[in-house]
């Protein structure tokens, strides 16, 4: 089975290839999020909220190379600066890879299966293959796929090692089964993760 693209939404980076902090602050207020909501979560929820025709019953597939870098870095700093028993449980729970899709299900009242995948160059391919498998099971007509990356010193280095300029983005895709004569939604062969994202959203 192949997938077709129904709709997409994107929280683009600014001129410095980072999300604009003023924009994220405004989106936190617009969506009723707490001021401590991390940058990646705010960017993803912004993109999800603006997705045309977003269903609340579609399985959610979240893909990110490294996850919530600002939260991970904050937790690591706390581990260095404070005794282990003084590390807040919220700091830990918000740093795990599935924290962002978990926040999405709460924000939008989605009672759906959630999958969280990490990976590098082949991440989109793996996420889309899982989306195909989920839809092939016949329990849902659509799937929501999120691909997102947040910059940090470590993430920037990883991106440069993969031959791309570091950037932040939150891309959301509403996918369905390929219809007769429809075009399959796949990254072109040989085009890496970041170049594919740039080509889709003209970064």
Image (cartoon, grey):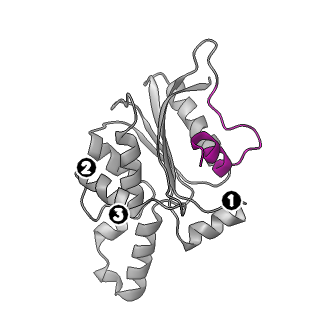
How crowded is the residue under tag 3: few (<14 C-alpha within 10 Å), some, or many (20+)? some
Q: In x, y percent, where is residue 62? A: 48, 46
Q: In this view, does 194 lie to the left or right of 55?
A: right
Q: Name the residue under label 3.
A: 93
Q: In x, y percent, where is residue 11? A: 45, 48
Q: In x, y percent, where is residue 191? A: 73, 44
| The residue stretch that appears in magenta | 184-203
Q: Name the residue under label 1.
A: 164
Which residue: 28% across, 65% down? 36
Q: Which of marks 2 and 3 is nearer the N terminus?
A: 2
Mark 1 and 2 residues: CB-CB less than 8 Å, in contact? no
Spatial CA distance of label 1 from label 2 is 33 Å
Q: Name the residue under label 2.
A: 30
> Circle 2 — which element?
helix
Could you tell me if residue 150 is visible in this image? Answer: yes
Q: Earlier in the sequence, mark 1 or mark 2?
A: 2
> Circle 1 — which element?
loop
Q: In this view, does 75 lie to the left or right of 88?
A: right
Front position among marks 2 and 3: 2
Spatial CA distance of label 2 from label 3 is 24 Å
């Amino acid at each position: 089975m192949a997938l077709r693209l129904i709709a997409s939404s994107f929280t683009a980076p600014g001129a410095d290839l980072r999300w604009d902090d003023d924009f994220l602050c405004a989106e936190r207020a617009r969506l009723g999020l707490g001021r401590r909501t991390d940058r990646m979560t705010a960017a993803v929820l912004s993109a999800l909220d603006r997705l045309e025709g977003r269903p609340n019953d579609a399985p959610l597939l979240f893909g990110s190379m490294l996850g919530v870098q600002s939260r991970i870095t904050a937790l690591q700093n706390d581990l260095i600066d404070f005794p282990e028993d003084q590390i807040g449980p919220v700091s830990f729970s918000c740093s795990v890879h599935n924290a962002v899709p978990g926040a999405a299900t709460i924000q939008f009242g989605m009672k759906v299966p959630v999958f969280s995948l990490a990976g590098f160059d082949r991440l989109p391919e793996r996420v889309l293959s899982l989306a195909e498998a989920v839809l092939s099971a016949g329990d849902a007509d659509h799937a929501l796929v999120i691909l997102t990356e947040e910059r940090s010193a470590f993430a920037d280095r990883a991106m440069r090692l993969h031959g791309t300029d570091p950037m932040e983005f939150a891309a959301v895709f509403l996918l369905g089964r390929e219809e007769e004569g429809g075009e399959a939604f796949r990254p072109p062969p040989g085009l890496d993760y970041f170049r594919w994202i740039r080509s889709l959203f003209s970064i």
